[in-house]
Structures are given as structure tokens and as C-alpha cells.
Image (cartoon, rainbow, N blue to C red):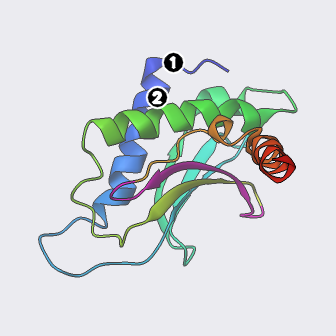
Amino acid sequence: MKLSEQSLSIIESAIQKAVAKYTCNCEQTAVTDIHLQPDQTSGQLNVYNDDDEELANVMIEEWATYDGDDFLENVEPSLRSILCRMKEAGDFEKITILKPYSFVLVDEEKETVAELLLIDDDTILVNDELLKGLDKELDDFLKELLEK
């Protein structure tokens, strides 16, 4: 699903509004993740913290008109791209959430579908493709070591 620039901008503004609640010039830190919950039926994007407190809510018209069965799979790359762009722009540097924290895609039951972006001082997990095949590679490596 290709979103318009306007929709991408609306989503980015909602995320900025949500994380702004965790921006201050103080030593206080929160322990939470940020949950993004898109709804295909209404077109709403709700942003929550771990306590189910709503941080932002916007309407994305293209989502409401999408009628495929793979909605969350189509929304995930757009959200991940927006978050990565925001991170590169430094939008998350002044946030007082204790690291590591994640931006997480959740379904209507608030069950985790995907980790979109992990924010840590020295680790960024932005793509599950990095870990695919790792088990096989480690098994092959161990087998080779044991045979010698």
C-alpha cells in the first residue's frame, strides 16, 4: 500500500505528538514502549504507551478504504520507514524514556505484530531480515567445529 505524502506527514506528526509527552529538560525518565495500533475499519492510528494511555490519534483515509486481508503487513513497511527517517533526523534524541525502548506495531487486541524500531545507545534493530537463517548458520558452524 503506497501512502500519499499527506498521510505520511500525518503519521509522522502523530508520532511526534506522542513522543513529545516524553520530552522535558529534566532527569525524570519513563519506562515504556510506544505502541502503534492502526485500524483498517476506521482508518485510525492510535499511539499508546505500556499503560494503554493514548498519546496520539489520527485518521488515515487510505487505510479506511483499503480492503485487502493483509492490512498490517502492508502498513508495517510504511511505519518502519517513517520511524527510521525520524530517528535519522534526531527526533528521538531528547526523549526521556529509559533506553532501550521500542516502537511496536500492535493489532486490535494490542498483541505485538512487529517491532518497528528499537532505540538503544548502541543497538538499532530495524529489520528482521538480519536474523533470518542465523540458526542454520550457527548449527553448520557448530557441526563443522565438532567434526574437526
Q: Nearer the viewer, residue 66 or 51?
A: 51
- Report whether 106 appears left or right of 35: right
Furthest toward the front, the residue is 148
**Dot 2 lies on which element?**
helix
Q: How crowded is mark 2: few (under 14 residues within 10 Å), some or many (20 or more)?
A: some
Q: Residue at x 42, y 37 (%)?
A: 84
Question: Are the two marked residues, 2 and 1, in contact with CB atoms closer than 8 angstroms?
Answer: yes
Residue type (three-letter) at the residue carrying disc 2: Leu
Range of magenta residues: 109-122
- Report whether 72 appears left or right of 8: right
**Dot 1 lies on which element?**
loop
Residue type (three-letter) at the residue carrying disc 1: Ser
Which residue carries the number 2 mark? 8
Whole-percent x, y for residue 134 in the image = 73, 43
In magenta segment, residue 17: no
Residue 18 quadrant:
bottom left
Whole-percent x, y for residue 49 in the image = 50, 69
Q: Residue at x 39, y 59 (%)?
A: 120
Q: Residues under labels 2 and 1: Cα distance? A: 6 Å
